Image (tube, rainbow, N blue to C red):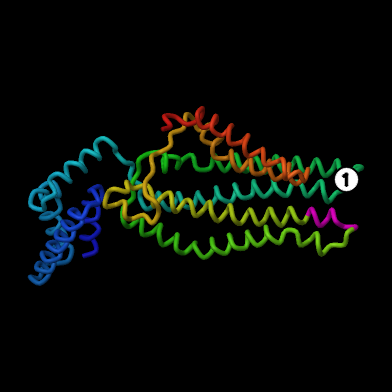
Amino acid sequence: METIKNYLESMFASMPNTPEVRKAKAELLQMMEDKYNELISEGTSENAAVGTVISEFGNLDELAESLGLTKEVEVARGMETEMPRRFISLDEAKAYLSNRNKKALFRALGILLCIISVSFVIILGPKGVEVLSGVGLMILSIAIGIGFLVYSGFTDHEWTFIGHEYCSIDMNTAAYVKEKQRSFEPIRALCVSLGIVLCIVCWTPNILIPFRYQPLGAGIMFIVVGFGVFLIVYSNSIARGFERLLNVNEKSTISGQYANGSGYSKPVKYKSKTAQTIVEVYWPTVTCIYLIISFLTFSWGTTWIIWVIAGVFHRVIRINCIADED
């Protein structure tokens, strides 16, 4: 019977999500169940009964008139012709989520290294040979961090069609993703909570460590902040992978109700893979630059201008990197 229900879902997946369609779907399911039970009571095997039911009730185009869905079926077929969708199988969804974990890790590591890079200069001292070593380590840390950020943008090129093209998933795939999302939610809550706590208590080393060792306290502060941001970025990046998959279906259709989120949004098309990478790493890079400059100069009252400048440049970058943007 589960096979029949799944087949019915696939039949109605692209149909408009209206009360009339939902009512017709429920009526058709009842007819299919009645026929299935009748065949089973007559001694027909389960597989044969399923095959008979699907062959008798499995063509929505033929049933449209009797179900009062002639107009709705025409609309659905027109949408399928004008806006064909790439189907994402369960195996592809699993592979995408696995790749998303990898991307989240490299992105979070990149931001972590950029934030803690300042610690090397602070801890190794403000003058002498030590400061040169600190600057060298800071530059190396930033370079590796930016490298991780750029690499994270290239790790999912195989999956750029998700969210950038018209796609669809079936009920079983959506159920799998939802289950994974529910399982990850406690981990995400813990990571975000702990990350926020670390960012709040980052000043503690400056209070506990004696004044003559204040550079050490300041350096540890950056390390604490870095790990706090790492936890937040890592967990949220993974969570966005679930949301992206659950929101690929057109929200106005029956399959659109599989998602928990806000529904389908128009795909973003980039002019090139390089352009896509630039857009994806732009704000993490700006954040790192802002934190580094602010903590080095302690000019928090003026460094906010970085966000204004970044906002202007972001618009310019989007215009030059994204094709056919509305």
In the picture shown, does residue 161 fall above or below 263? above
Between 5 and 94, the one lying in front of the other is 5
Q: Is residue 130 magenta?
A: no
Residue furthest to the front in view is: 301
Quarter of the image with the N terminus in it: bottom left
Horizontal and vertical percent position of residue 322: 47, 31
Going by the image, does 268 lie left or right of 145?
left
SS assignment for the magenta stretch, majority: helix
Horizontal and vertical percent position of residue 169: 34, 50
Residue located beneath label 1 in the image = 126
Going by the image, does 301 lie left or right of 36?
right
Specify few, some or many for label 1: CA neighbours under 10 Å numbering under 14, 14-19, or 20 or more.
few
Region rendered in magenta: 212-219
Q: Is residue 215 magenta?
A: yes
Horizontal and vertical percent position of residue 270: 46, 32
Residue type at tag 1: Pro
Instruction: Name the image quarter holding residue 52.
Output: bottom left
Instruction: Name the image quarter holding residue 73.
Output: top left
Horizontal and vertical percent position of residue 148: 63, 43
Residue furthest to the top in view is: 320
